[in-house]
Amino acid sequence: MMIVMKATATEEDVRSVAERIESVGARADVSEGAEITVIGAIGDRDHDLRVADLGLETYEGVDHVMPILKPYRLATLADALAAAISESRSA
């Protein structure tokens, strides 16, 4: 999960989001850029679900939240479809 902070987010806003991410067992990786700060929520799928349930979109200073990984079943289906298309084109 990636949390993109607003350009106007304060250090306290960033710290608050990072602490909330860590409260559910994920690791918060804060990357500060020239314009914005991005927080990566690092963990397994269980952590992703917990972070998604936090409602971080409503936190002060948060611009938007982006899932990074496709849900497992959808990713598996997409891979299977891509393989089937590739096989049919080669035949």
Image (tube, rainbow, N blue to C red):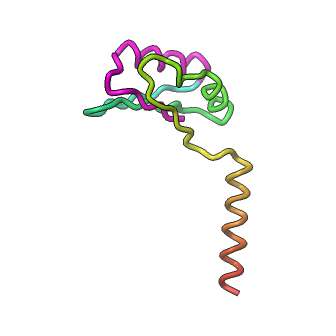
- Is 28 displayed left or right of 54 in the figure? left
* Left or right of residue 48, residue 7 in this image: left
Q: Is residue 79 left or right of residue 29?
A: right
Check if residue 23 falls in the magenta segment. Answer: yes
The outermost residue toward the bottom is 91
Tell me: residue 90, above or below residue 46. below
Query: Which residue is rendered at x = 69% and y = 74% of the image?
Result: 85
**Where is residue 62 drawn, in percent x and y?**
45, 24
x and y percentages locating residue 43 in the rendered image: 58, 32
Kindly identify the residue that appears in the image at 51 percent across and 32 percent down.
Answer: 65
Range drawn in magenta: 1-25
In the image, what residue occupies the spot 49% across and 35% down? 2
Is residue 24 or residue 82 the one in the foreground? 82
Q: Tell me residue 87's x, y (percent).
A: 70, 78
Looking at the image, residue 51 lies above or below residue 89: above
Place of residue 89 in the rendered image (x, y in percent of width and height, measured from the top left): 66, 82
- Name the quarter where the C terminus is drawn: bottom right
